[in-house]
Amino acid sequence: MAELKLGKLPDRTPVKHTVTVSPELNADLHDYATVYEKTYGQAEKVPELIPFILQSFLDGDRGFAKARKQGGAVSNGRKDTGAKAGA
């Protein structure tokens, strides 16, 4: 079998989560979508933005990154490889 520079791709099957948010958070999310549209000139629905907002939050949480690195956290078979979502 050939040795490729690119390893086997990880599972990319989407996982659906259902959450309930407060009216205040719902309003904030819609405001974010409005600012996003004004900034980038493209409308996106709140459900389309939420995964990217969450990923950005997790990527920027230094405490989480430190704890994950120290504990070697693995969730559902996914090790922290430093890869960004959608990359």
Image: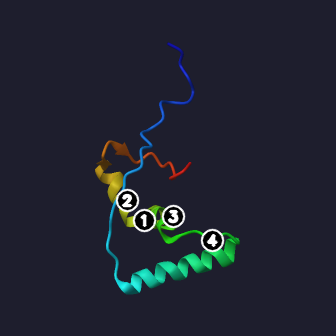
- Contact (Cβ within 8 Å) of mark 4 with mark 2: no
Q: In this orientation, which residue lies closer to the viewer: 86 or 19?
A: 19
Q: Nearer the viewer, mark 3 or mark 1?
A: 3
Residue 86, image x and y in percent?
A: 54, 51
Label number found at residue 62: 1
**How many angstroms separate mark 2 from mark 1 (CA)?**
6 Å
Pointer 3 or 4: first along the chain: 4
Residue 15, above or below 49: above
Pointer 1 or 4: first along the chain: 4
**How many angstroms separate mark 3 from mark 4 (CA)?**
10 Å
**How many angstroms separate mark 1 from mark 4 (CA)?**
30 Å
The residue pinned by badge 3 equals 48
Q: Which residue type does callout 4 highlight?
A: Ala
Query: Viewed as shown, does residue 43 lie left or right of 68?
Result: right
**How many angstroms separate mark 4 from mark 2 (CA)?**
35 Å
Q: Please, which residue is most extreme toward the right here? A: 41
**How many angstroms separate mark 2 from mark 3 (CA)?**
28 Å
**How many angstroms separate mark 3 from mark 1 (CA)?**
25 Å
Q: Which residue type does callout 3 highlight?
A: Glu
Instruction: Determine the residue positioned at 69% across, 71% down.
Output: 40
Residue 76, image x and y in percent?
A: 30, 46
By what rule are the colours in the image chosen?
Answer: rainbow
Instruction: Determine the residue positioned at 32% across, 53% down.
Output: 70
Label number found at residue 43: 4
The residue pinned by badge 2 equals 66
Q: Nearer the viewer, mark 2 or mark 3?
A: 3
Label 2 Cα crowd, 10 Å radius (few <14 / some 14-19 / many 20+): few
Q: Which residue type does callout 1 highlight?
A: Arg
